[in-house]
Amino acid sequence: MLTDVAEIDATQREILDLIYRLTFPLGDWPTYRKLDLYMDRELHIADTQPALLAIPAHLLLRHWGKHGFADTDEMRLTLLGVAECTDGPPDLERVAKFLRWIADYEQTQPIDANLAVTSSEYATVLGLDLGPRPEPATGNVTSALDALEDPRFGPARAEMVRLRVLAGAVPGFWGGGGYQSETPWDWYFQVDRRRVRGYRDLSGLSDLLIRESPKVVAATQPPPAYTYSVTSPFLTTYPATFPYSLNVVGEDGLSLVQQSPQEGVSSQATDQPDADSASRSTSPSGTGEPDTPSQRDIPRGEAGVRGDSPRALTPLLTVLRAEIAVLCTAAFEGGRYDDAVFEAFRYVEQAVQNRTGLTDAIGRNLLTLAFESDGEHRISVSRRGGDQLRLFQLFDGAIGLIRGDRAHKSKPSLPCRTAHECLRLLAHASVLLDLLDRDMAVAPGVEGYDQDVETLTLRVARGTPTTEVLIDERPATILRRTTDTITVSITEVLPGEHDVVLIDGTRQSPATSVWLARKPSGSSWYRVEEIDIPLFADAACTTPHTSTGLRLAVQEAGVRGQRVVPTQRRYVPGDYVSWKWDTSVSLPRAWARGHHMEPAYEVFSSSTLFDGDPQSAAHAPRTIRVTLEPPRLKVRPKERAPLRVLAWKTDGTVTWAEPLHDVKVQTPDKSVAAWNDGAIFVKGPGKFVAHVECDGLYAESDIEVAAHSRDTVAEWITGLPPVTSMAWAKTGLLLATRESQLWRVNVSDGRFSAGASLPLRPPMYGGCNIIASSSDGNLAVLLYGEPNIHVLTAISEYAASRVLEKPEPDGTITALAWHGSDLIVAMHSGTLYRVPLEGDAVLLGTAPQAVTYLCPHEAGNSLLAVAGTGTLHLWRLDPEHPEEPEELLTEPVSWSLSAVASTSRGVYATDFHGGRVLRLDGQALVPVVNGLRYPDALTESADGTLYVAEFAENGSVYRILS
């Protein structure tokens, strides 16, 4: 086979066969996600990326080059790849016949008409019946499969599907085409009439592969020779496999033009020149014999120019560095080749001296200091290990051998005798100067980057207004520049790892690897954490259940948690799955054993069967960007504020943030502001930018220090998971985010850190949901999905807790608040209880409607309450008489009143869906802040500052200054 150019093993052939099989019957190349799962299941290949990258690129198209495949990449075979498949060659023979038919058909059509062919036309030629014309699009894939399985028309339709897929893989032949997903056999192609000529004599499969894969086939065949005829007194025509022609410009001017065998009337491909061309090649007089020795055939590689005509070669000096050309032209044209070479390499040595400042050093001493030392004079062009030694050897050999041979003696040991040899040595000197311009100390360099959805901002050192950006060797569109950044568009760049290079004239940076992430597709996902959890039909866990348990890590609407669900399917830990259930199966109550001596727990009272499909596998996480949180900070002089560095990581499906501690945030002047381990202390007024650099990534935060007025709204903490509740304690601001940890902004140093932690328990593994702080510092915590209340004691600095059982065993707690040293607890039934830390709960009464939120009011003598469903009430509530609340609003509200706080400035409330903060003015709520994302928590600090938190992914806590 032609594809034996790069031998493949049996496993690679199985992968190619699998890709080809998954492509049909509908004719859709499988995505990498789908192929990954099938390779794991059917071929038992767990690590699929290396296996796919090992397949030669001429068989399997690359989307990310050397870096791998994204989940949504289509895994497309080339024609050579299809030829390696078991069912491929017969299908490709049909493609060859189809292309030959199109070539013949084109000759019968009017010259000025566009050429289009359809499956119906070609099926008629083959005598195939595709059945009735398709109905209008329904989008029903099942109907397409049914149609392809139709015993009357299915085989013919399947052949047209295969023909569409493979003919569409012929590069450059088609100007357009289309089909409907529900009728994949009903297609059309718009044909390039000029290119179709090349298929008129197409003989079959082998001929097709030769035409469509010339680079691969060329590796198995000797290259043809080309004869170029150029009229010039300085040039000789010769047969050579040289990819350039020499064009005459004026009397003596020459230029190199890259030329293919099919371009230009004066080039012809031939294994041996005919008699006429041989005569023309060797004798300008046409006699067939060389006129003089200087007119003999010039050896290949001499560019077809006489070796004794240096002036004829002078135009070729334009390919050299400008300084070399200017310095050496006179000596070169005068035939003083050794002088030209000496001047060129002496200039290279001087360039090294100037670059390093070592003007008194020469020879090996200079080069050792420039390339092998670790001091300030070091010249480096690459970060790759071993390149520094190679760079030294390259310069040491050139200057020591070529320059040194001509510096200390009347005649060099290795003289330069021809203009061609001189040119090549001058080109070598030019290459060395190019390398010096890649010195990372003088070339533009990428010091960090930050990605937005469609843009990439590079932090650039030594950039100029003419600096260009290449991404994977392709020029990037520059959107804007600043003194130290360049922002480029990445709308057409695939997610994954890419190389970025900066070029400014001859100065070039080394490649910097960047990782670009795709735009998140949604905020919900489900990942398999634990499989085969034994389920039982009784609380004693003695009778096995009919199904097993599956523990999933989940994120729904930005909120993370865990679930234990029943299933009868097999899953792989780490895989992401869809949220799908088999509702035809109803399961009775189930229990599971607790871990580590914990009691058994009820998993569900009744359930259907989880039946989610695997969607993607988790890969090793990698950092895709860093951020400084918050990106904009407003503070007053002498304040301390949290300023966190977050690393955003991805495993290919999910993106999350982790705090970084072993980094240093830079501020322009430490006398104005100083950062220390997650917090910044500002000393005086001003505006400045703090920035951080980490592993090639960078981030900034704009900080404004001023006498900000009362009621100024400013971001305080950003990059948070959804915040469910807040409380102000003596140690600082406490936040609950449905995690096991409670977070705290320390009042003394401004740092954001873990304040406390509670164990998560199955089956919900719910984190902290509601928190409330008492006047003596105790903290009440209600875990999501848990029935009871945990009280973290202030005396233990929240290191110990006690559990208070809910007042109604079958009820659900909806709200709680401290009243003195006791808790007032509201149940979903509308009843309210006083729950002391010691002793039994006391029923206080029943409110007219269920209470959904409680907080202290008027120095703790009464409570504020939100109550009702649909339309919501705001009450002042006497805990001893909950059945008689006082309405604070003239009428109930129909919007989402979610949280209230009684502050030194009055009563404030949040509108969850409306994104507002409101203040009670008389008997009406008046907006004071707009534009938030799901505000759901309020609290006031000791100095009267109001804090409001968003229940949103990547949410924020804002301050309303006092």
Image (cartoon, grey):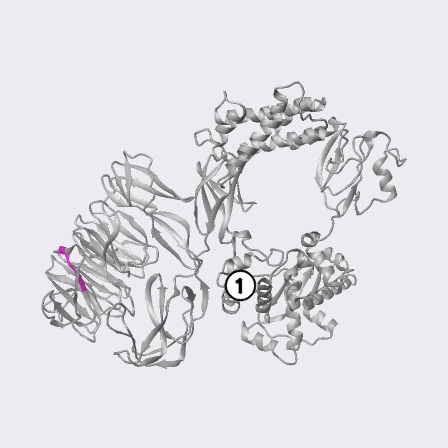
Q: Position of residue 36 (x, y in %)?
A: 50, 64
Q: Nearer the viewer, residue 131 or 695?
A: 695
Q: In the orientation shown, which residue stands out farthest toward the top?
A: 410
Q: Could you tell me which residue is drawn at 58 percent across and 30 percent down? A: 397
Query: Is residue 952 shown in magenta?
Result: no
Please tell me in which quadrant of the rendered image residue 843 appears. Answer: bottom left
In the image, taking residue 763 as reference, residue 103 lies left or right, namely right
Q: Position of residue 106 (x, y in %)?
A: 76, 61
Q: Let me know if residue 354 appears in the view.
A: yes
In the image, taking residue 458 as reference, residue 540 lies left or right, namely left
Q: Position of residue 119 (x, y in %)?
A: 68, 69
Stretch of the chain drawn in magenta: 790-795
Q: Nearer the viewer, residue 856 or 247?
A: 247
Q: Nearer the viewer, residue 627 or 81?
A: 81
Q: Could you tell me which residue is drawn at 51 percent across and 61 percent down? A: 48
**Quadrant of the snapshot with the N terminus:** bottom right
The residue pinned by badge 1 equals 31
Please tell me in which quadrant of the rendered image residue 837 appears. Answer: bottom left
Q: Nearer the viewer, residue 374 or 66?
A: 374
Structural crowding at the residue carrying mark 1, measured as other residues with C-alpha within 10 Å and reported as few (<14), some (14–19) or many (≥20): some
